[in-house]
Image (tube, helix red, strand yellow):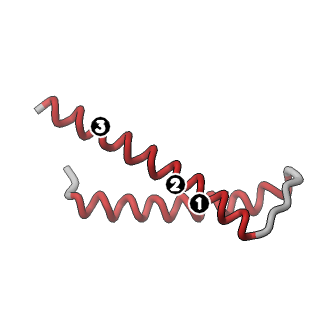
Amino acid sequence: MQSRRQSLIETIVHIIAGFLTRFLVQVMLFPVLGIVLPAGENLAIAGVFTAVSLGRTYIIRRVFNFLHGKQK
């Protein structure tokens, strides 16, 4: 089992990687779909999806930790 510090570091790296991936995909994909947005709006959209991803990941991790704890 990971320590809380290790979980925090993993989560931060995961979120940064996800944010950068989402932003780069948006910058490349949106113009192909005819969606042209300023960089600031692309950053805002990537930020919203990152926040949703963070919440989803946290909830799933806590559920699995809870279930794992019940099995002991």
Q: What amino acid is found at the position of numbered circle 3 in the picture?
A: Phe
Whether tag 2 and tag 3 are in contact, CB under 8 A, the answer is: no
Residue shown at the point (46%, 52%) measured from the top left: 54
| In the displayed structure image, the side of residue 67 where residue 48 appears, left or right | right
Label disc, if present, on residue 47 of the rendered structure = 1
Mark earlier in primary sequence (2, 3): 2
Residue 28 sits in which quadrant? bottom right
Q: Position of residue 66 (x, y in %)?
A: 23, 36
The crowd level at tag 3 (other Cα within 10 Å; few <14, some 14-19, many 20+) is few
Q: Could you tell me which secondary element the residue under label 2 belongs to? A: helix
How many marks do you count on the picture? 3
Label disc, if present, on residue 67 of the rendered structure = none
Residue holding disc 3? 64
Mark earlier in primary sequence (1, 3): 1
Residue shown at the point (73%, 64%) measured from the top left: 41
Whether tag 2 and tag 1 are in contact, CB under 8 A, the answer is: yes
